[in-house]
Image: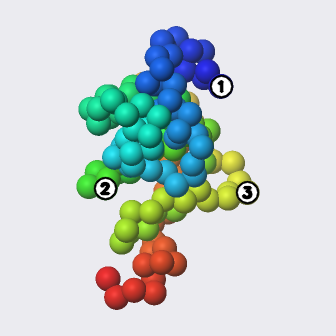
């Protein structure tokens, strides 16, 4: 799917490959992990190119960039608003099946901001880390 073209951006082969590989997984990979995935298809691609394209795709809303200050950024090929679970030990991120609509900021509370979205992230310890003495 060429979502990016619909947002007015050029769909280069590198960008298309990054997007395709990111959409194949639900593991919410880091930029380094995306680089490892894409390098199997485009062996000459640089890590810097992957970082720049992920930043570009996330700035256009084609992919989600996850993680707050002090956490390693992860990327989600599903740009639709949905909540996540993050492990505070290993950084693993999972999609959360959420039966409720995510909240929207009332217009009168937006204080002049535009393009608002709601990012919901629950933080805990994943099952893998819960069984370890970290």
Q: Earlier in the sequence, mark 3 or mark 1?
A: 1
> Residue 2: x and y, percent?
61, 21
Q: Residues within 10 Å of mark 1 (few under 14, many from 20)?
A: few
Q: Earlier in the sequence, mark 2 or mark 3?
A: 2
Q: Which mark is residue 1?
A: 1
Residue 55, by quadrant, is top left
Closer-to-camera residue (98/104) = 98
> Residue 54: x and y, percent?
40, 33
Q: Residues within 10 Å of mark 3 (few under 14, many from 20)?
A: few
- Whether residue 61 is visible: no
Relative to 65, does residue 133 appear above or below in the rendering?
below
Q: Which residue is mark 2?
A: 71
**Tag 3's secondary structure?**
loop
Q: Which residue is mark 3?
A: 99
Q: CA distance from mark 2 to mark 3?
A: 27 Å
Quadrant of the image for the N terminus?
top right
Total marks drawn?
3
Looking at the image, which residue sits at the far right? 99
């Amino acid at each position: 799917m060429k979502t990016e073209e619909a947002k007015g951006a050029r769909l280069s082969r590198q960008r298309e490959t990054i997007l395709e590989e990111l959409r194949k997984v639900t593991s919410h990979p880091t930029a380094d992990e995306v680089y490892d995935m894409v390098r199997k298809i485009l062996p000459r691609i640089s890590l810097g190119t992957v970082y720049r394209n992920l930043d570009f795709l996330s700035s256009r809303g084609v992919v989600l960039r996850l993680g707050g200050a002090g956490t390693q950024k992860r990327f989600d090929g599903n740009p639709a608003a949905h909540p996540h679970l993050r492990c505070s030990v290993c950084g693993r991120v999972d999609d959360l099946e959420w039966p409720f609509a995510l909240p929207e900021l009332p217009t009168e509370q937006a204080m002049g901001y535009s393009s608002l979205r709601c990012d919901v992230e629950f933080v805990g310890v994943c099952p893998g880390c819960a069984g370890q003495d970290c």
